[in-house]
């Protein structure tokens, strides 16, 4: 038997069934008329944002990383709730503009930006977080061609990383950002050529549940930003502190202590106030804002026994939930939080494997999970599905197509 991950606090039992926001998940599935489906809770997202506003320093803005979940109703909701948006492609820029987001609230990071993407971003008024000197040259040339003053920031590759992070985005040789020692010269070139200087983006890693590591990384970011600003010789207009705030996925994971992080950041910024007197600050968050607010619901289409083991075969799978299947950067596969919709608070009675409908042994949603008895037609809920589910899974694999999505 393998333990399941912790179910986020936004979900409750109503008459024994899985519910949230005072409504049964079964009702949402019936309204959609099909499975599989991603269901996102507006109330859960708003609760998470409100808590961040409460614990973070007042002058630290919240940016939404569109890559986590670009579902248009979520982008439209976020337009009213967060301060800015971070994108990583021309496609995400188009989605943001289609959702009515002001391009001047958007910053664009990511290596390998194509000329067409640079042109679209500069034309719209997006801030480009430059990843290299070559990208800077192309952006400056594009601005001259368009007769538009480009809004340019530099993404910094620092010498440190976010310890214990799921994906390390800084420290050592990386495809991301400009090595710290080369940033001042590049910034002076950008400013000297008449671009609108928009500051620094220092993103060190993601998916950390270690408050101490995040506090240390933020301290290092502020120190580095101060040193770079002194070397550049121009006040820093904006500092993107990055993110890295993780959510619990697996057995034994504990929620991040945001009160501790917020208090430490407030204290650290207080002693740096002179260096950054006119600087705007932001944190860049995706998974932390929407990850726990989503649930993926799939229906059991077959129940079978193989060599004494129970297999619950669903109409969903890794083509919608690649991360839950263990095929999205996980070295040792562990179970995501998962439950039967009809028996959310029931005692487990059997050990079962929950698998998808794809013709590959990689298509697993839970291994040897202790669950209540399940039958064909029952609904299975996979939690922590609000980020990097629909947006990071191979929906075209084997011609299965995408799942439905719903913001409620």
Image (spheres, helix red, strand yellow):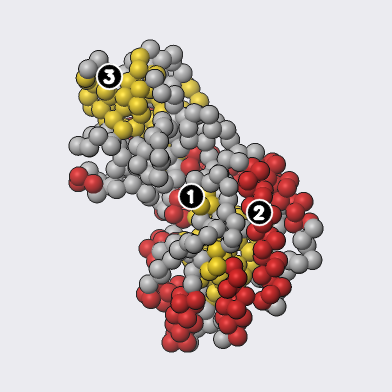
Total number of numbered labels? Answer: 3
N-terminal-most mark, 3 or 2 = 2
Which SS class for mark 1?
strand
Q: In front: 177, or 45? A: 177
User: Residue 89 in the image: x percent, y percent?
Assistant: 41, 64
N-terminal-most mark, 1 or 3 = 1
Which SS class for mark 2?
helix
Question: What is the quadrant of the N terminus in the image?
Answer: top left
User: Residue 240 in the image: x percent, y percent?
Assistant: 60, 61
Which SS class for mark 3?
strand
N-terminal-most mark, 1 or 2 = 1
Which residue is label 3 attached to? 310
Marker disc for residue 218: 2
Marker disc for residue 238: none
Quarter occupied by residue 38? top left
Whole-angstrom CA distance, mark 1 to mark 3, is 34 Å
Classify 10 Å Cα crowding around label 3: few (below 14), some (14-19), many (20 and above): some
Q: Which residue is depicted at the point 43% across and 50% down? A: 69
Say whether marks 1 and 3 touch (CB < 8 Å): no
């Amino acid at each position: 038997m393998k333990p399941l991950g912790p179910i986020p606090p936004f979900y409750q039992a109503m008459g024994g069934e899985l519910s949230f926001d005072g409504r049964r998940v079964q009702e949402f599935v019936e309204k959609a008329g099909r499975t599989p489906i991603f269901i996102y809770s507006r109330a859960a997202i708003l609760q998470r944002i409100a808590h961040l506003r409460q614990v973070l320093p007042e002058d630290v803005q919240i940016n939404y990383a569109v890559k986590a979940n670009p579902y248009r109703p979520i982008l439209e909701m976020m337009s009213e709730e967060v301060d800015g948006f971070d994108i990583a492609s021309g496609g995400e820029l188009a989605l943001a503009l289609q959702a009515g987001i002001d391009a001047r609230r958007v910053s664009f990071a990511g290596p390998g930006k194509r000329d067409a993407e640079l042109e679209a971003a500069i034309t719209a008024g997006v801030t480009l977080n430059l990843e290299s000197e070559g990208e800077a040259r192309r952006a400056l040339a594009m601005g001259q061609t368009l007769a538009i003053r480009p809004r340019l920031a530099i993404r910094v590759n620092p010498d440190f990383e976010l310890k214990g992070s799921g994906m390390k985005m800084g420290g050592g040789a990386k495809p991301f950002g400009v090595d710290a020692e080369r940033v001042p010269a590049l910034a002076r070139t950008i400013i000297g050529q008449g671009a609108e200087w928009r500051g620094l983006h220092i993103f060190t890693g993601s998916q950390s549940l270690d408050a101490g590591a995040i506090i240390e990384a933020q301290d290092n970011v502020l120190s580095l930003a101060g040193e770079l600003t002194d070397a550049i010789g121009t006040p820093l207009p904006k500092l993107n502190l990055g993110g890295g705030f993780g959510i619990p996925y697996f057995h034994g994971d504990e929620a991040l202590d945001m009160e501790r992080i917020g208090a430490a950041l407030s204290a650290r910024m207080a002693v740096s106030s002179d260096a950054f007197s006119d600087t705007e600050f932001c944190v860049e968050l995706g998974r932390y804002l929407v990850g726990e607010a989503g649930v993926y619901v799939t229906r059991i289409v077959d129940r079978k026994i193989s060599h004494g083991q129970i297999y619950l075969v669903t109409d969903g799978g890794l083509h919608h939930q690649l991360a839950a299947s263990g095929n999205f950067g996980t070295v040792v596969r562990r179970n995501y939080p998962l439950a039967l919709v009809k028996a959310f608070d029931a005692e487990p009675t059997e050990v079962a494997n929950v698998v998808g409908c794809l013709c590959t042994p990689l298509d697993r949603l839970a291994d040897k999970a202790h669950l209540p008895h399940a039958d064909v037609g029952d609904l299975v809920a996979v939690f922590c599905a609000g980020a990097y589910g629909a947006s990071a899974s191979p929906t075209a694999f084997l011609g299965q197509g995408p799942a439905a999505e719903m913001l409620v």
